[in-house]
Amino acid sequence: MQPVTYFDRITFDQNVLNGSATIKGTTFLASKILELMAEGLSKDEIIKQHPFLEQEDITATLNVAIKLLK
């Protein structure tokens, strides 16, 4: 089964963290980005804490969350 990828940044792969949404190529949970933003961190602060992330990863996470909530 091929991983499902949205916006070329977020992946749901059954072989990685039981299919939880992760940033492509990592085991970093997309939900962690949402948690950090809910705590009040900015995109720049999140990237400073997790330098392997890019602005596009955060934007993709927000877009996937919006898509799933619609």
Image: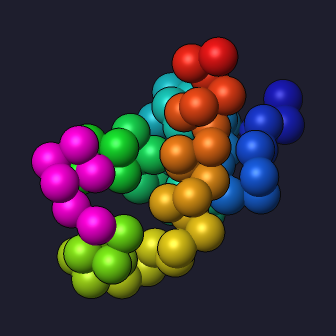
Q: Tell me where residue 39 appears, x and y as whole percent.
A: 15, 48
- The region drawn magenta spans 37-42
State the residue at coordinates (21%, 62%).
41
State the residue at coordinates (36%, 51%).
33
Q: Tell me where residue 47 appears, x and y as whole percent.
A: 35, 77
Front one among 1 and 44: 44
Viewed as shown, does residue 4 lie left or right of 58? Answer: right
Question: Is residue 62 placed above or below 42 in the rendered structure?
Answer: above
Q: Is residue 39 magenta?
A: yes
Front one among 16 and 28: 28
Q: Is the magenta stretch mostly helix, strand or loop?
A: loop
The number of numbered badges drawn on the structure is: 0
Question: Is residue 10 placed above or below 56 in the rendered structure?
Answer: above
Q: Tell me where residue 48 appears, x and y as whole percent.
A: 27, 83
Q: Which residue lies furthest to the right in this view?
A: 2
Q: Can residue 55 be seen in this snapshot? A: yes
State the residue at coordinates (57%, 58%).
59
Q: Which residue lies furthest to the left in this view?
A: 39
Q: Is residue 15 magenta?
A: no
For the N terminus, the image quarter is top right
Viewed as shown, does residue 4 lie left or right of 15? Answer: right
Q: Tell me where residue 43 appears, x and y as whole percent.
A: 36, 69
Viewed as shown, does residue 61 lie left or right of 9? Answer: left
Viewed as shown, does residue 59 lie left or right of 52? Answer: right
